[in-house]
């Protein structure tokens, strides 16, 4: 065996690990930590060099983590590494809106006081989350990292599954997990087809500084062209923006200089937080839905965006992925404890039954919400305003929405229920 390098990975040899994970974005590291902390050995192969994201400065990209996701991060030892950098979400205000008009009359508010679990979620910047995953993986026995390496081929063998890397290395394991994002090569090579469609929308993502304190409130405005989310960041005076527009409009806005960009954002944003100024880099993401027809194949499982790339309308993409992580870790660790083959059809079938319906239903639900709200039809507009008013007036219904958004409904994997794996 070659000497491990400074990051704990090896060069030029065949490695045996229980689980091979293709993709070290966010779900890959979370799964690796859950498995390794339960005694399994894991190889994580990621196309990007580890430093590419770990050394990133503030760029405005952030996630809304549901309570259930926080519990999983606690269970895998990542939460203490990010706890000082999160912004609790204390309120969520949603409204129908039009540029320059401000919110519609029925402003739907969800308040953390209506559930017992405390804040409904937490905002966390991508750079802190990724750096914490990397540090935790480096500190955990049983995880071998292969940064800057790409999986180019895979094969089910008599003993298990093998993955070939672009560098020529071959890794062997009992289960191969595709955490390689929407364009999952693992899924494609396993013969898993995808369905999906574009929305003709692009998300403009940045951060703004604002004069007034956000007081932990997340805002979601449903504009005719697409939703605008204003998500609170630590300190009270910065928020992350995810702003969806039709592709051509988004391209025009992105091409503007900072002054022009701010002038386009201002009427959509409104004046409720006082003066605003750009505070982060400006990113664009084309929006699409991409669902794998199956989440498993022979000795293969798909997790996160590789299984389901969804519209970011409710900020649920990563939360859905972490539910997959909790479910797959649970069935695999339980199989290992029973002395069974962790890559066999039994645990994989259990995983697929657990996750496929839930993830697909949520993905299609978000798709429907986006279609209903990204629309200026006066009837639809009145209907949805009335709907918001009704939900607002009924505390029981509101509480269900809050618990749903916090990831507390449905059959939760142990790690998401705050229990040990
Ligand atoms: C605009 C926008 C805003 C969002 N906001 C939120 C939010 O507020 N809350 C939320 O929960 N989610 C949000 N999401 C969704 C979230 O970003 C994704 O769900 C999440 O990043 C998916 O993580 P992943 O690990 O599955 O995949 P990815 O992050 O896509 O990672 C895949 C990794 O696989 C690697 N890879 C690919 N191919 C190979 C290969 N052949 N070999 C080795 N490595 C490979 C890539 O280098 C990459 O590192 C948002 C998404 C968008 C677009």
Image (tube, rainbow, N blue to C red):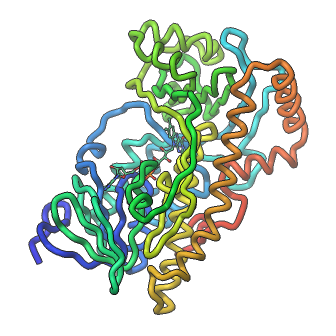
User: In the displayed structure, would residue 234 be above or below residue 139?
Assistant: above
Q: Residue furthest bottom?
A: 339
Can residue 241 be seen in this snapshot? no
Q: How many marks?
A: 0
Left or right of 418 in this view: 41: left
**Above or below, 173 relative to 273:** below
Dividing the picture into quarters, in which one does residue 162 lie?
Answer: bottom left
| Residue at the spot 51% in from the left edge and 91% down from the top edge | 338
Q: Position of residue 274 (x, y in %)?
A: 59, 13
Can residue 30 be seen? yes
Place of residue 165 in the rendered image (x, y in percent of width and height, measured from the top left): 23, 62
Image position, residue 281 (x, y; %): 38, 25
Out of 153 and 279, give the one closest to the viewer: 153
Looking at the image, residue 398 lies above or below residue 32: above
Query: Measuring 20% from the left and 58% from the top, which residue is drawn there?
Result: 166
Q: Where is residue 318 drawn, in percent x and y? A: 52, 50
Viewer-nearest residue: 78 or 263 = 263
Front residue (pair 324, 290) = 290
Name the outermost residue toward the left: 2
For the N terminus, which image quadrant?
bottom left
Residue located at (73% from left, 29% from top): 373
Q: Quadrant of residue 38?
A: bottom left
Q: Residue at x 38, y 31 (%)?
A: 59
Quadrant of residue 211 within the rendered picture: top right
């Amino acid at each position: 065996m070659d000497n491990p390098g400074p990051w704990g990975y090896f060069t030029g040899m065949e490695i045996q690990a229980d689980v091979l994970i293709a993709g070290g974005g966010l779900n890959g590291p979370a799964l690796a930590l859950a498995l390794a902390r339960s005694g399994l050995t894991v190889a994580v192969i990621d196309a990007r060099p580890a430093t590419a994201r770990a050394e990133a400065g503030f760029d405005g990209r952030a996630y809304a983590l549901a309570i259930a996701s926080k519990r999983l991060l606690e269970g895998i030892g990542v939460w203490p590494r990010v706890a000082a950098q999160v912004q609790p979400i204390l309120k969520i205000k949603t409204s129908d809106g039009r540029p320059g008009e401000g919110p519609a009359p029925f402003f739907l508010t969800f308040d953390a006081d209506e559930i017992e679990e405390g804040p409904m979620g937490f905002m966390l910047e991508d750079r802190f989350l990724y750096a914490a995953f990397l540090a935790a993986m480096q500190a955990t026995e049983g995880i071998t990292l292969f940064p800057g390496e790409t999986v180019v081929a895979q094969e089910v063998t008599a003993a298990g599954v093998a993955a070939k890397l672009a560098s020529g290395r071959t890794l062997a394991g009992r289960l191969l997990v595709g955490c390689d994002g929407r364009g999952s090569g693992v899924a494609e090579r396993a013969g898993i087809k995808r369905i999906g469609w574009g929305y003709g929308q692009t998300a403009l993502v940045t951060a703004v500084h604002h004069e007034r304190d956000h007081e932990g409130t997340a805002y979601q405005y449903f504009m005719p062209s697409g939703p605008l989310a204003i998500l609170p960041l630590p300190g009270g005076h910065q928020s992350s923006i995810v702003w969806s527009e039709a592709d051509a409009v988004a391209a025009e806005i992105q091409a503007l200089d900072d002054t022009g960009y701010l002038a386009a954002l201002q009427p959509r944003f409104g004046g409720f937080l006082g003066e605003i100024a750009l505070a982060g880099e400006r990113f664009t993401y084309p929006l699409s839905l991409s669902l794998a027809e199956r989440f498993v194949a022979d000795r293969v499982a798909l997790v996160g965006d590789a299984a389901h790339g969804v519209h970011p309308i409710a900020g649920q993409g990563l939360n859905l992925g972490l539910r997959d992580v909790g479910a797959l870790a649970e069935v695999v660790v339980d199989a290992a404890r029973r002395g069974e083959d962790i890559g066999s059809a039994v645990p994989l079938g259990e995983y697929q039954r657990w996750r496929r319906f839930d993830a697909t239903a949520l993905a299609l639900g978000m798709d429907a919400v986006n279609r209903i709200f990204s629309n200026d039809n006066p009837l639809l507009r009145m209907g949805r305003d009335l709907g918001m008013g009704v939900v607002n007036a009924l505390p029981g219904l509101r509480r269900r929405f809050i618990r749903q958004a916090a990831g507390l409904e449905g059959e939760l994997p142990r790690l998401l229920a705050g229990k040990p794996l």
